Amino acid sequence: MSKVYLALQDNDISRYIVEAIEEDNPDASIQHMPAMIRIENEDLLVIRRETVEDKLGRDWDVQELHLNLITLGGNVDEDEDQLTLCWKS
């Protein structure tokens, strides 16, 4: 098993995104660092539009994630409803 990860700027919008990620990925590890939040999980990490919208209280386009993204590790599969990180063989 290999970990996938995502690092976001530590700001108000990212905090809601992280709450949504925690809800959809209960085994994910969240590390708060100065100015950055790192989220990692074994094999798979999913960011769902619907869950982020519930946390933000407004419409959210998955592409908005890139405004707060610092780095990521894993293969990206993205559509209008979610962004998934995983390692493909």
Image (cartoon, grey):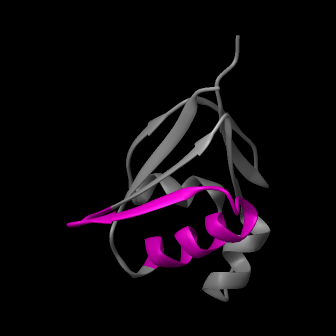
> Where in the figure is residue 40, as x and y percent of width and height?
52, 48
Residue lying farthest to the left in this orientation: 34
Magenta stretch encompasses residue 72: no
Q: Is residue 73 above or below residue 61?
A: above
Q: Is residue 72 above or below residue 28?
A: above
Residue lying farthest to the top in this orientation: 89
User: In the shown orientation, is residue 56 left or right of residue 77?
Assistant: left
> Where in the figure is residue 64, as x and y percent of width and height?
53, 60
Magenta stretch encompasses residue 22: yes
> Where in the figure is residue 22, as x and y percent of width and height?
63, 67
Q: Is residue 25 above or below residue 55?
A: above
Residue drawn at x 63%, y 64% as measured from the top left: 21
User: In the shown orientation, is residue 82 left or right of residue 31?
Assistant: right
Residue drawn at x 33%, y 70% as measured from the top left: 10
User: In the shown orientation, is residue 9 left or right of residue 54?
Assistant: left
Residue lying farthest to the bottom in this orientation: 57
Which residue is more in the foreground, 9 or 41?
41
User: In the shown orientation, is residue 14 left or right of residue 56?
Assistant: left
The magenta-colored residue range is: 13-36
* Quadrant of residue 77 within the rendered picture: top right
